[in-house]
Structure formats: structure tokens, C-alpha cells
Image (spheres, rainbow, N blue to C red):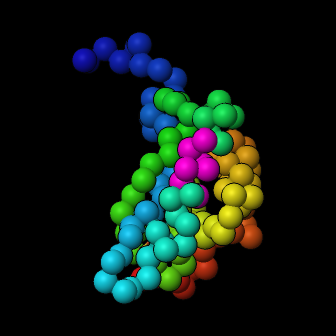
Amino acid sequence: MSDTSSAPAAAPGYYQRHIFFCLNDRTNGEDSCAHHNAQAGFDRCKAQVKAAGLAGAGKVRVNKAGCLDRCAGGPVAVVYPEGTWYTYVDAADIDEIVESHLKNGQVVERLVTPAELGR
Ligand code: FES
């Protein structure tokens, strides 16, 4: 594996962008992202990324995550490599994140999770 000349051009990050959705579902009475339609947000994002032809190596990956410890801003998703955190509400929000950020690299400022919101 010392010859790297055949490595794909997009190899450094493998994915151009990677979005993680917190799907944590607390059953102890505490709030969590799953109580705010996180699964629907994840499913919508996954479907929209696939439909737009953005899924795959060198492009975009959509993944489930457990608690990301920013529950107060939930439901949350985070996009790397930028490290942009989003708080979304509905399918239209997800569609805007896909089209603007995941496809075109433009942060959707109106959906950015306020910096002070942690757990
Ligand atoms: S429950 Fe979603 S960030 Fe903690």
C-alpha cells in the first residue's frame, strides 16, 4: 500500500461532506432529539441526498448518531468537515440543508444551532 498514485482524487476526506443526525431516544422522562421527529429528519435527508445523486464516496454520507450532547438545541444534526450544527424543524428545513449546504457548500444560517445551546 505504499503506492498512492491510484488513490481517488477525493480521497483525503473520503466523503466531501458527512452529516450526523442525533436519533437519541430517552425513555427516562428527559427530553431528547427522538421526541422532536429526528427520525423523520434523518429519513428525509437520506432520501433527498440519494435522489439528488449526492450519495457516495467523494460526495455525501448521511449517518445516524447517538446523543451529540447538544440536546437543548435538538433536534440537531452536524455537518463535517465544516462542523456546522443545525437545528431543524421540518422537511423544508432538511431540504434546504441538502440543497444549500450538502450540495453547494453554503451554510443555512437561519438553521444554525445557537452557540450557547449545549446539553
Ligand atoms: S439527545 Fe440529541 S443531542 Fe442529546
State which quarter of the image contains the N terminus. top left
Q: Position of residue 110 (x, y in %)?
A: 74, 70
Question: Residue at position x 55%, y 66% from top?
Answer: 37
Residue in the picture at 45% in, 34% down: 14
Residue 115 rendering spot, x and y as whole percentages: 57, 79
Q: Percent from the top left, x then y, of residue 85?
A: 56, 66
Q: Is residue 27 above or below residue 43?
A: below
Residue 12 higher or lower than 81, as above or below = above
Q: Quadrant of residue 87?
A: bottom right
Pick out the residue farthest to the left.
1
Magenta-colored stretch includes residue 44: yes
Q: Residue at x 26, y 18 (%)?
A: 2
From the image, give the main secondary structure of the stretch colored magenta.
helix
Position of 77 compared to 4: left or right? right
Q: Does residue 23 sit above or below 5 in this rendering?
A: below
Q: Which residues are magenta?
A: 41-47
Relative to 34, 112 lies left or right: right
Query: Would residue 43 be found to the left or right of residue 95 on screen?
Result: left
Instruction: Please state the horizontal and vertical placement of residue 119, each as a whole percent of the image.
Output: 42, 83
Which residue is depicted at the point 73% across and 46% down? 99
